[in-house]
Image: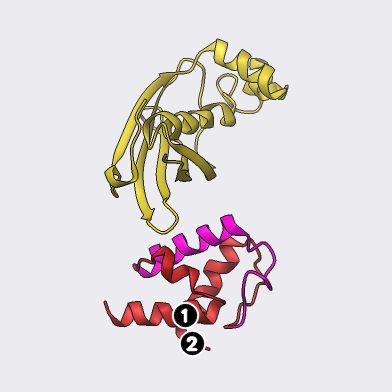
Chain colours: A red, B yellow
């Protein structure tokens, strides 16, 4: 498990209100309960604040699952 | 009423206003909510519960968060997405409350504003809130 995936777990559990949630790189809005459009905004905003990074709408539109998000985050964190 | 555009917003932008709680507000909220709990209506019951007088409805004071975002920050183009409130202390009729709001985070991708807000009575914090709003800018 990547460090980022581990750090994302509590954010997803909090935002999606599911203490038992276990996300993986393959997790997506299609496979995780309660991950609707408003929850998606809440997730992105929470990640931005936790990791002190910013996403553009274009970058977010390309993401298919949590793994894509982690890859994008690694790029941004490496560039800081 | 303020009418902030996205380009005018920044982290740290803050507004505040003050309001005095009145008996009419309690009557109005009673009719609006239908909450007949005696803690808010019966001074004897409230004193037996350890309070000096009837306690003002928490959701009445929290309605002031609606004014904060709808009128002040960001104002005209506000679209409320969500709010998380923690109540710290009771409020009473006659109290002067100050409502404060400050932008804590701006999400450019979705034009989402996160506001840290509080309601204080001059000596104590009545409640704190995290408010999430969008900007329905035309």
Task: Look at the picture and state if B53 lies above or below B81.
Answer: above
The answer to whether residue A10 is left or right of residue A71 is right
Provide the secondary structure element on which disc 2 rests.
loop
* Image location of residue B104, percent across then percent down: 35, 50
Q: Marks 2 and 1, how far apart in space?
A: 9 Å
Provide the secondary structure element on which disc 1 rests.
helix
Residue A34 on the magenta span? yes
- Locate the N terminus of chain B and report the quarter of the image it occupies: top left
Looking at the image, is mark 2 or mark 1 nearer the viewer?
1
* Quarter of the figure with residue B49: top right
Residue farthest along the top direction in this orientation = B24
The answer to whether residue A34 is left or right of residue B89 is right
Task: Look at the picture and state if A53 lies above or below B91.
Answer: below
Q: In terms of depth relative to the viewer, which is nearer, B132 or A37?
A: A37
Q: In terms of depth relative to the viewer, which is nearer, B37 or B100?
A: B100
Q: Which residue is mark 2?
A: A2
Give the residues in magenta: A26-52
Q: Is residue B90 visible?
A: no
Q: Is residue B138 visible?
A: yes
Q: How many marks?
A: 2
* Image location of residue B124, percent across then percent down: 40, 33
Q: In terms of depth relative to the viewer, which is nearer, A48 or A71?
A: A71
Subunit under mark 2? A
Residue A39 on the magenta span? yes
* Image location of residue B61, percent across then percent down: 52, 28
Q: Which mark is residue A70?
A: 1
């Amino acid at each position: 498990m990547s460090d980022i995936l581990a750090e994302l777990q509590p954010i997803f559990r909090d935002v999606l209100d599911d203490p038992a949630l276990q996300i993986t790189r393959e997790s997506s809005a299609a496979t995780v309960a309660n991950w609707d459009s408003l929850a998606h905004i809440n997730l992105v905003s929470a990640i931005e604040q936790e990791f002190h990074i910013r996403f553009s709408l274009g970058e977010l539109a390309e993401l298919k699952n949590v793994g894509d998000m982690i890859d994008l985050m690694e790029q941004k964190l490496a560039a800081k | 009423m303020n009418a902030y555009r996205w380009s005018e917003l920044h982290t740290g932008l803050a507004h505040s206003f003050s309001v005095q709680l009145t008996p009419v507000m309690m009557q109005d909220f009673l009719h609006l909510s239908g909450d007949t709990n005696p803690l808010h209506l019966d001074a004897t019951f409230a004193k037996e519960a350890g309070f000096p007088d009837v306690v003002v409805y928490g959701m009445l004071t929290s309605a002031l968060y609606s004014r904060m975002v709808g009128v002040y920050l960001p104002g005209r183009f506000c679209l409320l997405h969500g709010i998380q409130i923690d109540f710290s202390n009771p409020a009473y009729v006659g109290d002067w409350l100050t409502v404060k709001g400050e932008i804590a985070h701006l999400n450019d991708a979705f034009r989402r504003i996160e506001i840290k807000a509080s309601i204080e009575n001059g000596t104590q914090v009545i409640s704190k809130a995290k408010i999430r709003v969008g900007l329905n800018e035309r």
